[in-house]
Image: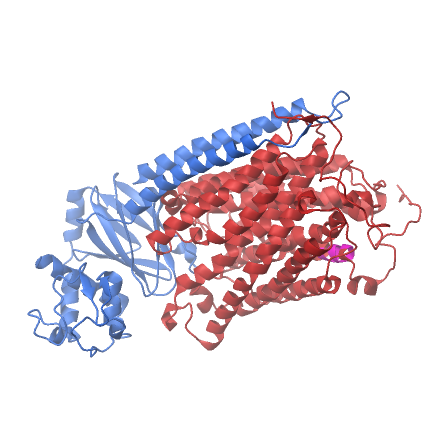
Chain colours: A red, B blue
Amino acid sequence: MSAITLPRQDTYLNINYGIRSWLLTTDHKRIAILYLVSITLMFVIGGAAATMMRIELFTPASDLVDAATYNKLFTMHGIVMIFFFLVPSIPAILGNFILPLMLGARDLAFPRINLLSWYIYMLGAGVTLWALIAGGVDTGWTFYTPYSTASPTHVVAATVGVFIAGFSSILTGLNFIVTTHKLRAPGMTWFRLPLFVWSLYATSLILVLATPVLAITLVLVAVERLFHVGIFDPALGGDPLLYQHLFWFYSHPAVYIMVLPAMGVVSEIIPTFAHKGLFGYKVVAISSIAIAVLGFLVWGHHMFVSGMSLHAALMFSAFSYLVAIPSAIKVFNWTSSLYKGSISYDTPMLYALGFIGLFTIGGLTGLYLAALGVNVHVTDTYFIVAHFHYIMVGGSVMGYFGGLHYWWPKMTGRMYPEKWGRAAAIIIFIGFNATFFPQFILGFEGMPRRYAAYPPEFQFLNMLSSLGAVLLGIGYILPALYLIPSLWFGKQAGPNPWDATGLEWKTSSPPPANNFEKIPVVTTGPYHYPGKQDKVG
Amino acid sequence: MASQVDMLFFTLLAMSVAVVVVIAGLIVYFGYKYRRRPENLVADQIQGSMRLEIAWSVIPLLIAMGIFVWGARLYFEMASPPAQARDVYVVAKQWMWEFQHQDGMREINALHVPLGEPVRLTMVSQDMIHSFFVPAFRVKQDVLPQRYTTAWFQATQPGTYHLFCAEYCGTLHSGMVGDVVVMAPQDFQTWSSQGDAETPAEAGEHLFAQFGCINCHKADNSGRGPALAGVFGRTVTFADGTTTVADENYIRESILNPDAHVVKGYEPIMPSFQGQLNEDQLLQLLAYIKSLGAKQP
């Protein structure tokens, strides 16, 4: 097979060549590619740690690795996956590439700051990876005090790495907010914005408002370790619950940083592959903002057994039920959008439908955890591990893969092999459920999380989970095996292979360096497909 | 308690299965019926329906509020041990559990309890945050350094149950496990009468004399500090007019940091015993002070 040569056409990829043209680029599309490469690398590292953990947990005894190594593995998995994969993946890769195109802009509002945020990310990742390689960290990604004050491992370096990476998030969020306000094409009113833009906007608000609190908290941990100032460690006169409050004040909204963009991706994919507007567009758009706002009021639900006051627990439980409602509304609207559609099942659609199913299960099990009396039993067990993986992996990662396949033709100008794409999506869906569904049962039966060794009666379900993880691992490797060759061998995509409606599909694939020959003028809402106007029923 | 928690858990499970079946069912049904084929190339454009939006916002909200109230009631019950509960004092440390029974038995990584009798745990950690978790009893409570937390349970079946540390506490976290042994009341009686250890309250009484507490906190209230009989659980008034209920953590603070809250009518002259008493001894003093209340109602 030989590479198919395309007729010469000016694109952001061929406008100039060489390493300098990439490392000094201010083109949001090239920066997105830089992020794609570096974030994928982090995904591989975090995934390798998870694989080691699942192999270790195949048997009850701590035999493949000792307890100290196991603790470092789950810490590394958590830190890398959350701060260096889930938080930046969709915004910094897909958002970076697509947001200006969707708005009809030539770039983000601050192209140099955009490049700076990638360098900050790389610096943060470098420092954190150094800590992990130089001997590791064993505090868990949560860095709970007083253990993180006492642990003999490389806590300061790891927190410094996360601290640095936080600034990359803040700058990206700021850039997206300003771009959405100032660089919309003529006629692109707020309620003509695609839902991916709405969800990135909501995400950016959280990035800008919550990330500084994490940064402050991590600085305080470092100060306590280095100068023995009593802040969180009761032995020094501090309060460990204060740490938990500050940490979750960022880290609960961070859950929405990770899942809102994926919701946005799904809200793009469903209209495209059903050839119709999204049911309840405005309600879905406002839901994103509601989630961002309410998400700031629920952090205490991570602390129901921590010794927090009963009345605080009551408030946090009530707010947690409120934040569930806009998510539920979105699920109902996505499902209703299929009604009387013209639905095709290309790879992105499979991921989007998989997202709805897995996110629904993740969301429903959140109701168990928000119920105070039930939370006491299942918190800190595998139930909670399963719950947040349904949201983070079943939700965010499915959304990311869906979006990557959806916009791959736009980003590269080439199609990937559709059959392989569908096969991988189905393998990931099955492998994911096989890995994480047994963990709900394990948790209800009482297996605590973060255990290197466990009582033998939990072995059967752990074996199922580990076998599922093998399948899931294969599913994740497949896209690399067909996406990379598609850069040379894929068939030419053309500007709009999916018959989609967004402005990003109105320009060539891959787009020219300045995105549009002529800035488009917007005259209709998003997802404007032909078909008779109809009402429900 | 376990059956009440399970009742809510399985109600939630039934509800979620119903929701998943409906959502997945609709996706499959719509997905098949409206699949793209030559006679269905153009979709109907449906903007949405405000009625439906309101219905599927308000109904889930009402259900959610119902679950909230149900879960909260259980939680408050979990936080309120019956008055006549049997006391067990717990010291957690990397990576073991130490128990001291009210009648003097001490044990490590095993907790013997009588069937059918409520057991109240007063817990403190000597180092990190740990968490006392017995899955069979649906009980879990973090154990904090420098601060008491409490939990209670009542065993309903004889047997041996897992005790886990549920809050990650360092290298051998997964080794910080033990057994809760539930015995028939007469067997427990036999078990707890072997050995002739002091009860925590008796040990506390000795400490009270040994550390000179008794010189100021005289029983007839003639000393430089207040008499302590009956103070536990009572509302005390401070020099600045504020009040608090004298609970475990107040007693602890009064021993380790007496100047923080000085009782009205007394001088701030008590020295701190920070660093002079270990966690076991503090719990014994607490048990003694609590017993003073019980003796003289």
User: Can residue A129 be seen from the camera position used here?
Assistant: no
Count of numbered marks? 0
Where residue A195 appears, x then y in whole percent? 66, 43
User: In this image, B239 relative to A7: left or right?
Assistant: left
User: How far from the left and from the top, in percent, is residue A292?
Assistant: 55, 50
> Which range is magenta?
A29-35
Residue A500, by quadrant, is top right
The residue shown at (20%, 66%) is B237
Establish if B179 lies above or below B278: above
Q: Is residue B144 above or below residue A410?
A: below
* The one of B138 and A138 positioned closer to us in this rendering: B138
Q: Residue furthest right?
A: A7
Find out whether residue B197 is within the magenta segment.
Answer: no
Q: Position of residue A454 (x, y in %)?
A: 43, 48
In terms of depth relative to the viewer, which is nearer, A180 or A150? Answer: A180
Instruction: Name the residue rendered at 47%, 65% in the picture.
Output: A148
Residue beneath the point at 55% across and 37% down: A329
